[in-house]
Amino acid sequence: MKSSEDVLNSCNEIFRTVFSDTTLSINVATSASDIADWDSLAQIRLLMAMEQTFEIQFALDEVEDLQNVGEIVELILVKVNQ
Amino acid sequence: MSPTQTEMIPLLWTVKDRGIFMASLQQFEESLKHKTIITGCKIAILSGSTTSLVSRLLKLFLLNNGIKAEILEGHFGNFFIDAMNPSAELIAFEPDVIYIHSSRVNLKSFGNLRSFEASDDGHSLVDNEVSQSLKIWKSLSDKFDCWVIHNNFDLSPESPLGNSEATEDFGHNYATTEINRRLVSESKNFAQVLIHDLNSLSASIGLDEWWSSRDWIQYGLAVSTMAHPRLGFSLASVITSVLGESKKCLVLDFDNTLWGGVIGEVGINGIELGPDSSRGKAFLEFQLTIKDLASRGVLIAGCTKNEMKNALSGLNHPNSILKPEDFAVIEASWDPKPIAIRRIIENLNFGMRAFVFVDDSKIEVHSVKTEFPEIETILLDSKFPEKYSSMVLRPRYFESFKLTKEDISRKGTQATPRVKKLKNASTYDHMQMLKDLNAVATIGRPTSDQLERVLQLVNKTNQFNLNGIRRTPLEIKKFAEDADSLVLVGEFKDDLTNYGLTTVIGGRFEGGSFKVEIWVMSCRTFDRYLEHAMLLALRSEIAIESANGFSLDFKRTARNDYFVGTGVALGLFDKSITDGTCQVDGKMMVIPSELPMKVVSR
């Protein structure tokens, strides 16, 4: 079983890669408004990297209304622990 | 150092690597911030589907080629309207290139099961699709003085009626293939129009990876996110080509590049080239690829550390597809490759950016890359010669958008290999390059584990070999163990490669003197000053037991010209050396005050 902390840590690595910032530190409240480069393309790249890393697939409706990192982590957690 | 094309390109070929590439996109962009810009290019993208991703990738790959792109993207799905009635913004933009990002999602005629060949209005559906493209090309040609790059159409990964989709005249794949054929044919009437071959690109990736229903539904991407890097790369290659920045000359190493083995060591009959072995076949395949490039107007140059006679004998091997006359120039010498390449550049009179250098040696590639950052380099792995062709072709260095008769005949005008040596105008500092590699030579008496390697070196080495005498395991063991003999071995490594044990020097004490009877070195460590380090180590060892100089038991063989040249340069003897015992005055040895390596005694 992965914990939400595990998932958050892995997500943090993905964010660092995608935004090319080794000092970036995200938390559950982090949202697109906190990261300047987080546009729609970045969103595609983030989700793609998460799918590869966690070996999961997001459904169409699951990724439409994600508000912040916490919601992404929660979604991933459900999938990896299924 | 910014990533070179060859460092980004390996990430384009599998889904997993493309995932890494896409995630790291921003890092690649940042690494190219300080790339030298050769030229700028204004590109208008007319949209048949979402263009933001292809736009960004196109910018990245063009920048990697030294082209700074300014891009104007049209509104989603608006390509036909934008082409027929360009906005004031598009006209004011004055593009150098208009790229029409359309694909099969833009085929309007599909969806009805009826013949593509004859329809109710007398025009086939194929006609309708082609005529839309013709309208676009005419309008753009009338209004803009620029290149127009238009995708042909990718096939659908799904076939509702299976095989019939390709074989019956109502089939999607049948129609798409027909449209693509017609587009190429019609485009010949438009000097500015180039067809970008989306069809082959999608096939190369595989339609199941190329198309993602989710990416289409969710993001409006007609090409999957994962396939996008290949699309951006392909377009950048075409645009680089129309801007005249494709490469023109391929500079090839010979040993372990055009054939397996070192011809100076194994001889003409020992190289791997031909149908009798898998590796021999792989080198043949690579030669075919090179021949094909040459026939398409790419100039081929040879750059090999070899005696010229050996280099040419390899090309004259009965199985060799490449012959000396296929080369515009052949540089065969023992000079460092940056010096040889400078001669090739001067000889062919192209700018440095026109060259691509290919070698299986890390240090050769490193030295060329360091000395000429503008030259693209490809490092081959001689364990996998079957991969050579794709290593050379995948980067699309030699993209040619319209092949002229001159291209095809170019080879003929330069057919005679120019083998004469030009003056050396290089300021290349080979010693400094070597020093920067932090090499370490570990020299000492061989351990019992090393005797097998010593035996192998002594019995296989030809070019750097004192006398070519072959030894039995027992002889080697006695050399290593007897009280009146001495053997030293040298192991070598640097930041690029661990070469292992590559050199052996050994002999016997006779009276008050020492006679060297074995001295061999693998060609892997030629030109690294390792022979100097070995001599110093020997001198230091024998000084303990012998105050005088030493002698060499020399014999000229068919293949040890390199040894003779090195011995002369070392001040051990002169060119006229004859077979037999040659006395060396240790004081006459020419050894630099500082060697480009750290020497560790073991």
Image (spheres, coloured by chain):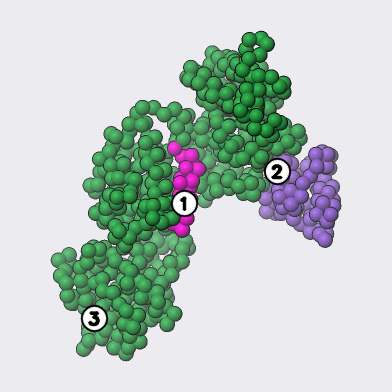
Chain colours: A purple, B green
Q: Amino acid at mark 2?
A: Arg
Q: Residue drawn at (72%, 52%), measured in percent from left and top? A: A53
Quarter of the image with the C terminus of chain B in it: bottom left
State the residue position of label 1.
B386
Give the SS element for disc 2. Answer: helix
Of A57 and B369, which appears nearest the observer?
A57
Image coordinates for residue B416, horizontal then vertical, percent: 25, 40
A60 vs B45, left or right, is: right
Q: Chain of mark 1?
A: B
Residue located 24% across and 72% down the image:
B467
Tell which residue pokes out farthest to the top in this image: B121
Q: Mark 3–mark 2 contact, CB under 8 Å?
A: no
**Which residue has dot 2 on it?**
A45
Q: Quadrant of residue B291?
A: top left
Query: Could you tell me if residue B309 is visible in this image?
Result: yes
Regarding residue B332, the answer to whether it shows in the image is: no
Circles 3 and 1: CB atoms closer than 8 Å: no
Please count the marks in the image. Answer: 3
User: What amino acid does circle 1 point to?
Assistant: Glu
Cα distance, mark 3 to mark 2?
Answer: 68 Å
Closer to us: mark 1 or mark 2?
1
Q: Are marks 3 and 2 on the same chain?
A: no
- Residue segment shown in magenta: B381-398
- Spatial CA distance of label 3 from label 1 is 46 Å
